[in-house]
Image: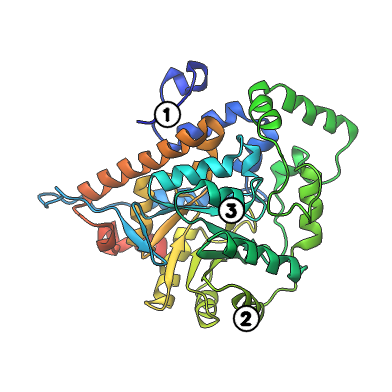
């Protein structure tokens, strides 16, 4: 096990973290509340965010016995890349505010554990810094911006940095109402009293101040230095979002993306089978079944409920990935059994990097690996590539009906 660099005070009940959920508690203790809630929260009443997890939990694995599982194969191929696990670290905005140069630490951890890392457009560390620090190519996530020229420059930078995959996020034509961020002053008008509370929240977390605010500089949006000048404050972030996210984007804009991106193209934010078919027809190499972790439109289906119909609609024409609610290796097995090629995980690595930096991210990936091995061994499936709906009780019809 990697050195966790965690004091006894950091550890839940004085013990070492044993799951991704343990890292959530460690992150809650270490981060200022406004930053923890930014990672942890969802849109509106957070019903969809909750259903991402509860719908996964409602699926039951079929325990099978007396099958040779002495040799387990956990690796798979995603968009031509060999992964040691069917897992990709999802793009997480503002991650460099959770730990010192967090995107660099997470990319290093992913490379060390044999999986891919996806850099967010709104990362603190720029794509060049992250790519230079990683032993394997990183993916790049892009929003469709009003300023098409700036977006073209970002695609050129990502390609020059060696990124083989562009993940185009398509579910942010408008920004969902995230009530926790409003209450904490991350968005909306902030009265003077609330500003004082926000400042007090920061200074009462001295380890975060030392690690991030002091030693983590420069705290600028590394990929958006020209677009968002100055420090990476919530105000600067909100102003950029309000001015740049494009509600007028349509399917026709994919031709523009394809014109300027020579690598693999993935559309993230697909929840409807019709949209999945359209994405493939328009040139996407893969889709990510995603509701933005429940952070956009509330009361939409969980990703695991939407997954089976999208897999059936896409067939063998493209790869289907999924995110949302993945917290364990058992969840990964369930998602792959319903037809996903791999899972993107966001919050688990964000919690882990906030709690323990690079070693925390490596550890949470090893936890997923161990859980995945147990789930495969006890379902009698020796290879993740052989998982199908027969690994689930009733073939997972509960999710398909979700």
Dot label at residue 17: 1
Dot label at residue 366: none
Q: Is residue 222 left or right of residue 396?
A: right
Does the rendering let one see residue 59? no
Residue annotated with mark 2: 255
Residue at image location 49% in from the left, 18% down from the top? 7
At mark 2, the secondary structure is helix
Where does residue 369 sit, x and y in percent of width and height? Answer: 33, 44
Q: Foreground residue, 104 or 390?
A: 104
Sequence-first tag of 2 and 3: 2
Residue at image location 64% in from the left, 46% down from the top? 125
Residue at image location 57% in from the left, 44% down from the top? 103
Residue 155 lies, with reference to residue 281, above or below; the image says: above
- Alpha-carbon neighbours of circle 3 within 10 Å: few (<14), some, or many (≥20)? many
Closer mark to the observer between disc 2 and disc 3? 2
Sequence-first tag of 3 and 1: 1
| Quadrant hosting residue 384 | bottom left
At mark 3, the secondary structure is helix
Q: Foreground residue, 359 or 292?
A: 359
Residue 88 lies, with reference to residue 272, above or below; the image says: above
Closer mark to the observer between disc 2 and disc 1? 2
Does the rendering let one see residue 375? yes
Q: CA distance from mark 2 to mark 3?
A: 28 Å
Q: Is residue 400 left or right of residue 163?
A: left
At mark 1, the secondary structure is loop
Residue at image location 38% in from the left, 77% down from the top? 315
Residue 287 lies, with reference to residue 100, above or below; the image says: below
Q: Foreground residue, 91 or 40?
A: 91
Q: CA distance from mark 2 to mark 1?
A: 46 Å
Q: Foreground residue, 192 or 400?
A: 192
């Amino acid at each position: 096990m990697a050195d966790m660099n965690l004091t006894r005070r950091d550890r839940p009940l004085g013990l070492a973290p044993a799951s991704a959920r343990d890292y959530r508690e460690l992150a809650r203790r270490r981060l200022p509340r406004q930053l923890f809630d930014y990672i942890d929260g969802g849109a509106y009443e957070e019903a969809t965010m909750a259903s991402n997890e509860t719908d996964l939990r409602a699926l039951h694995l079929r325990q099978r016995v007396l099958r040779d599982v002495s040799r387990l194969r956990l690796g798979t191929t995603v968009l031509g890349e060999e992964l040691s696990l069917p897992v990709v670290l999802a793009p997480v905005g503002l991650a460099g505010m959770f730990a010192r140069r967090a995107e660099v630490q997470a990319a290093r951890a992913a490379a060390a554990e044999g999986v891919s890392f996806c850099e967010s457009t709104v990362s603190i560390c720029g794509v060049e810094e992250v790519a230079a620090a990683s032993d394997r190519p990183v993916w790049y996530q892009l929003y469709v911006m009003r300023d098409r020229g700036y977006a073209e420059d970002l695609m050129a930078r990502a390609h020059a940095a060696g990124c083989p995959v562009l993940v185009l996020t398509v579910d942010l034509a408008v920004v969902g109402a995230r009530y926790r961020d409003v209450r904490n002053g991350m968005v909306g008008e902030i009265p003077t009293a609330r500003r004082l509370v926000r400042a007090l929240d920061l200074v009462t977390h001295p380890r975060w101040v030392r690690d991030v605010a002091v030693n983590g500089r420069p705290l600028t949006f590394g990929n958006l230095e020209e677009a968002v000048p100055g420090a990476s404050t919530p105000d600067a972030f909100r102003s950029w979002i309000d001015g740049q996210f494009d509600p007028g984007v349509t399917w026709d804009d994919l031709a523009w993306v394809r014109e300027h991106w020579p690598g693999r193209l993935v559309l993230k934010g697909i929840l409807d089978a019709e949209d999945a078919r359209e994405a493939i027809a328009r040139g996407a190499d893969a889709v990510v079944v995603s509701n933005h972790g429940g952070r956009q439109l509330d009361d939409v289906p969980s990703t695991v409920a939407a997954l089976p119909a999208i897999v059936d609609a896409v067939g063998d024409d493209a790869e289907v990935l999924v995110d949302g609610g993945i917290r364990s290796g058992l969840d990964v097995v369930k998602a792959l059994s319903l037809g996903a090629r791999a899972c993107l995980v966001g919050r688990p690595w964000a919690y882990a990097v906030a709690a323990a930096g690079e070693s925390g991210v490596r550890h949470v990936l090893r936890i997923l690996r161990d859980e995945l091995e147990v789930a495969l061994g006890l379902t009698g499936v020796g290879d993740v590539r052989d998982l199908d709906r027969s690994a689930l009780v009733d073939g997972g019809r509960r999710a398909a009906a979700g």
